[in-house]
């Protein structure tokens, strides 16, 4: 039989079965991780005397040569060899002879593939942490330039209260900070070593799992072999974190799409992050944030897909688990591409400060400050709320805004109004007096940026 496991079989595998069950089309992405795990495993086999040291050295050099070919894209992976593990082992035997068959002593593809994915996610998670920080840096840069820039703050997508544009942007910094913390924390669970668990029950060989963990940089060894080969929690966690990150990217992208529209005109995206229309020459389409928003669905789908695969699986390894990789790869690559685009798009966008200020002047987002003003004059808040409601209604009917009303008009609603109401209603004052910790005042925003910068220097 041509298969490395074919001794028990009397027939060749049906070609349709071979194509349907093979994973090499996607798990070849794990080639470097598979070789890294094999190098650590064979070193341990040699040091423990499980195979002769000369054989271990021969296997090591063979693996290193294969790694060089992989790095140069000179390796052709074959469907008939099923997966990355069998492809590498077949290449090894072809290169160094039957001694290559000793590499698989004391391990199974079950603990081997789990190890490969732990190694892959550890690398990707570390890279994503840096990419999230790049986005955070771009947010801080824009925030520093827009502490005094005022923008309408919204609830229900209705004008609510004026805020510093820097304050608005910094809300996303803290979302991404939590994302980064989740990624960092997940490394504790990614850094569990499955290798040495065998197919499900361990191995009869006197292996040294601690040595393999040391060589591969794992902090913890799975204490239960059945759990080790069937655990995909670490991938679920990654997909969950990835989905949350994409949610935050999507929310910011949605704002960019809105802000760059003719209706808002709060920002203009750099030409290098937009595209045109094939029929309407005047168009400048925010395709990048739109696509970032759209790709969020991929991340959600990958998470739900793996949850569904795992929900009914008995212990230990089942072929269903082959479905764990494509979603993991796709989410990792989607996050990487999205974050790499988001950072420079934020950094290069133009903020139309005058348009934002005009929007502030032409709304009733300073109405709450009249309530606070009357409360300080001794009027109960509920009564003050009713007074302001009537003032806003009167202003709408009169086609005026609050700063347009005369003192006589204010006096129609309450004798408590004095000339200082105009100072209270000035947008800069409305923002500046919200000086509680975490508020939108320039003083608090500067403090917030300082705290944020401290997060990035740790």
Image: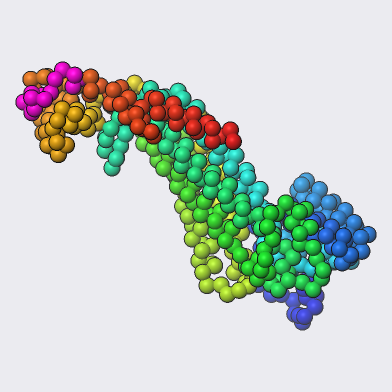
Q: Position of residue 290 (x, y in %)?
A: 44, 41
- Magenta-highlighted stretch: main secondary structure? loop
Position of 193 with respect to 128 (left or right) is right
17 over 194 or under it: above or below: below
State the residue in front, 381 or 453: 381
Q: Left or right: 180 with respect to 369?
A: right
Q: Is residue 430 left or right of residue 378?
A: right
Magenta span includes 114: no
Question: Residue at horizontal 14%, vertical 30%?
Answer: 378
User: For the point 42% across and 24% down, which residue is it?
Assistant: 146
Which quadrant of the structure image shows residue 100? bottom right
In the picture, the quarter occupied by the N terminus is bottom right
Q: Nearer the viewer, residue 68 or 454?
A: 454
Q: Looking at the image, which residue is at 28% across and 22% down?
A: 429
How far across and how far down the image is residue 24, in percent?
A: 69, 60
Q: Count every numbered label the image shows and give the total.
A: 0
Front residue of this view, candidates 253 and 390: 390
The residue lying at 74 percent from left, 65 percent from top is 196
Residue 196 visible to an observer of this rendering: yes
**Residue 8, how many percent across, how many down?**
77, 80
The magenta-colored residue range is: 410-422
Whether residue 81 is visible here, answered yes or no, is no
Q: Quadrant of the C terminus?
A: top right
Q: Is residue 14 left or right of residue 271?
A: right
Is 421 one of the magenta-colored residues?
A: yes
Is 212 located above or below residue 277 in the figure?
A: below
Which residue ends up furthest to the front in the rendered image? 378
Residue 160 percent coordinates (x, y): 27, 35
Residue at the right extreme of this rendering: 54
């Amino acid at each position: 039989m041509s298969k490395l496991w074919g001794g028990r079989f009397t027939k060749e595998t049906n070609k349709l079965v071979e194509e349907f069950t093979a994973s090499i089309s996607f798990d070849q992405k794990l080639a470097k991780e598979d070789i890294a795990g094999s190098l650590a495993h064979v070193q341990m086999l040699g040091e423990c005397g499980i195979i002769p040291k000369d054989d271990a050295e021969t296997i090591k050099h063979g693996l290193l040569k294969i790694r060089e070919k992989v790095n140069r894209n000179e390796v052709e992976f074959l469907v008939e060899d099923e997966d990355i593990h069998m492809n590498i082992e077949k290449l090894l035997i072809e290169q160094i002879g039957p001694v290559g068959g000793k590499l698989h002593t004391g391990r199974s593809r079950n603990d081997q593939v789990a190890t490969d994915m732990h190694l892959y996610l550890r690398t990707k998670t570390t890279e994503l942490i840096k990419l999230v920080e790049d986005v955070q840096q771009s947010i801080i840069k824009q925030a520093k330039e827009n502490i005094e820039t005022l923008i309408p703050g919204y609830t229900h997508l209705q004008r609510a209260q004026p805020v510093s544009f820097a304050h608005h942007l910094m809300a996303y910094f803290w979302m991404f900070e939590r994302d980064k913390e989740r990624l960092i924390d997940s490394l504790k669970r990614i850094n569990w070593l499955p290798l040495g668990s065998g197919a499900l029950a361990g191995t009869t060989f006197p292996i040294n799992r601690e040595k393999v963990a040391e060589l591969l940089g794992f902090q913890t060894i799975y204490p239960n072999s059945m759990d080790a080969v069937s655990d995909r929690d670490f991938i679920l966690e990654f997909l969950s974190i990835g989905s949350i990150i994409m949610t935050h990217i999507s929310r910011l992208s949605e704002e960019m799409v809105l802000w760059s529209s003719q209706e808002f005109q709060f920002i203009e995206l750099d030409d290098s992050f937009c595209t045109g229309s094939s029929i309407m020459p005047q168009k400048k389409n925010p395709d990048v944030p739109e696509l970032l928003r759209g790709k969020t669905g991929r991340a959600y789908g990958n998470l739900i897909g793996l949850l569904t695969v795992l929900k009914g699986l008995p212990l230990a390894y089942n072929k269903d688990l082959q479905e764990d990789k494509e979603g993991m790869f796709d989410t990792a690559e989607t996050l990487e591409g999205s974050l790499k685009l988001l950072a420079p798009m934020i950094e290069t966008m133009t903020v139309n400060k005058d348009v934002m200020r005009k929007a502030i002047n032409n709304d009733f987002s300073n109405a709450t400050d009249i309530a606070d003003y009357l409360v300080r004059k001794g009027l109960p808040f509920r009564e003050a709320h009713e007074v302001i409601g009537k003032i806003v209604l009167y202003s709408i009917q009169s086609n005026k805004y609050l700063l347009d009303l005369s003192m006589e008009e204010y006096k129609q609603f309450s004798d408590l109004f004095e000339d200082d109401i105009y100072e209270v209603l000035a947008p800069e004052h409305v923002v500046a007096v919200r000086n509680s910790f975490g508020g939108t005042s320039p003083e608090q925003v500067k403090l917030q940026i300082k705290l944020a910068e401290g997060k990035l220097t740790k």
